[in-house]
Amino acid sequence: MSIFKTTAATIALLGFGFATSALAQTIAITGGNVVTNTTQGHVIGGTVLIQDGKILAVGADVIIPDGATTIDASGKWVTPGLFTPLSQVGLVEVSAEASTNDASANKSKFSTALDGADSFNPKAEAVAITKIEGMTRMAVTTGTGANIFSGSGFIADTSGALNSITKGKAFIAVQMGERGANIAGGSRSAAWAYLRNALAEARSYRPGREREDALLTGPDAMALKSAAEGRMPLLVYVHRASDLMTLIRLQKTHPKLDLVAVGAAEGWMVADELAAAGIPVIMQPQDNLPGSFESLGATMTNAARLHKAGVTVAIAQIGEAFNARLAPQQAGAAVANGLDWDVAFAAITSTPAQIFGLEDKLGSLASGMTADVVVWDGDPLEVMSSPDHVFIDGKAQSLTSRQTKLRDRYMDLDKASEKPFAFR
């Protein structure tokens, strides 16, 4: 071998070693109350070892490699990052300003063909606000327009990175109940008839063979096909017990459908039936007032009753563009009304991951899982607790937002060396 080739090979090996070293960032979070969301349960005084964006090990006797960055979490809680199962974060900047609001498209000829990811702005202020409250992943959906269907929803992280879509075209949502009835023509019968026929059209759709009397455009039928064939969750907004029973009948007629009930204010009335049908529920536990005729039976014990019957429950501040971060408060309210703590916490972490088919990557702390990790200064379901550290894909995140900057700017004006112009 020539001197040149030997030198080149040596440089290549050195370069490889340097690259491996640079990538192999190891972080050890030690001494905390580690909530694993696995059969390992809570590990008191445990260690979470992170390397290259993945969790390497979790336990009380984890050996920490030399050179690892260590974070002392003694007296604190260490958990998986929170996962909101339904929101509109990143689709709206200012609600009242149409140019910044992509939450719905009332004048569009399309429905399910609309891809929510096309409207997502990871730099929106609400994304950072959501992240600093411990939320690392979120399911995002557009709203309904002139049709009962929304566009394709997606899963994203809250890092603010332009490549933060975790799973595109992850689900489709459909509005039933009172609102769906109004959109579809004035009655629940009209809404359910539209839904059943649209699903049938999507299942049988073949490009170039569109029917003249089709309910859906070709692109809409193509987009709905995955949900109609059970390869994608179909989230159904429904509250009234009788509407939930209609949803259950739809599941029995089409057992391949991957149905998820959203809202379910009167779910407790048909909890046994929902459990038997295997339909999970995304709910808002503090939705306890009869704000409409379809939610007269709303109660704050809804989550506990559903879980007791065997229903899989996920918790969200449903549909929020700005306050998805309040999911832990919703989960805490469910605990105060009879839901087990571990079940409530899973409802904002591992259960949403399970609903969207991401349970092998997100929602728990175990070897090989994506390193979405949060270190809290107290119980994450307590209102006064907040994150001290947030990691997404193993990367430490900034805990600042426009709100925190404004807070810091105006907190101690009397001590400020230079006051803002308006306060001089």
Image: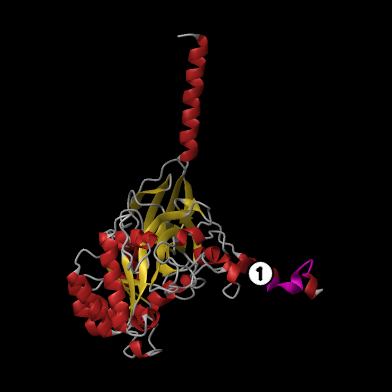
Residue 175 versus residue 51: which sits nearer the camera?
A: 175
Please tell me in which quadrant of the rendered image residue 314 appears: bottom left
Secondary structure state at the residue bearing disc 1: helix
Q: Residue at x 80, y 70 (%)?
A: 421
The residue positioned farthest toward the top in the image shown: 2
Q: How far across and how far down the image is residue 300, in percent? A: 35, 84
Q: Which stretch appears magenta?
A: 410-420
Please tell me in which quadrant of the rendered image residue 269 appears: bottom left
> Magenta stretch containing residue 411, yes or no?
yes
Disc 1 marks a residue whose amino acid type is: Leu
Q: Is residue 299 left or right of residue 98?
A: left
Please tell me in which quadrant of the rendered image residue 403 appears: bottom right
Residue 66 versus residue 213: which sits nearer the camera?
A: 213
Residue receiving disc 1: 406
The residue positioned farthest toward the right in the image shown: 424
Q: Residue at x 21, y 63 (%)?
A: 256
> Magenta stretch containing residue 352, yes or no?
no
Q: How far across and how far down the image is residue 419, in percent? A: 78, 70
Q: How far across and how far down the image is residue 305, in percent? A: 26, 81
Q: How many marks?
A: 1
Crowd rating for badge 1 (residues with CA inside 10 Å; few <14, some 14–19, many 20+): few
